[in-house]
Image (cartoon, rainbow, N blue to C red):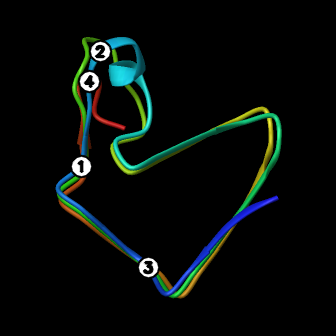
Amino acid sequence: MWSKINSTFANNTATGISAAEGGAILTAMGELMVDDSTFSGNVASANQSAGGAIINLYGNATINDSTFKNNSANNGN
């Protein structure tokens, strides 16, 4: 399990090979738990990208009491 509690992810940009997914966090085939955190201004920059703040592939995600603001991906997710 990957967990983050009381954290701030601000103004991160996924570039290069990882640019297609998850401006702040990319997880795959596992569990993600985020509590009391802020995601602001994160970008997944590639064409057809997804998950401006978080992308969790083939796993379970639990997000509680967190704020998401002005995160973006090129396909609008």
Element under disc 2: helix
Residue 68: where, in percent of width, then height? Answer: 34, 69
Q: Earlier in the sequence, mark 3 or mark 1?
A: 3
Q: Please state, as top left, top right, bottom left or bottom right, where the N terminus lies in the image.
A: bottom right
Tag on residue 7? 3
Task: Give the amino acid type for the residue marked by disc 2 in the picture.
Answer: Gly
Q: Which residue is mark 4?
A: 15
**Disc 4 to disc 3: CB gap under 8 Å:** no
**Disc 2 to disc 3: CB gap under 8 Å:** no
Q: Relative to the observer, which residue lies in front, 38 or 48? A: 38
Above or below — where is 53 with respect to 65? above
Task: Choose top left, top right, bottom left or bottom right for residue 59.
Answer: top right
Q: Which residue is mark 1?
A: 12
Identify the residue at image location x=81%, y=34%: 29
Above or below — where is 63 with respect to 11? below
Identify the residue at image location x=26%, y=16%: 46
**Disc 4 to disc 2: CB gap under 8 Å:** yes
Residue 49: where, in percent of width, then height? Answer: 35, 22
Q: Residues within 10 Å of mark 1 (few under 14, many from 20)?
A: some
69 displayed left or right of 52: left
Q: Residues within 10 Å of mark 4 (few under 14, many from 20)?
A: some
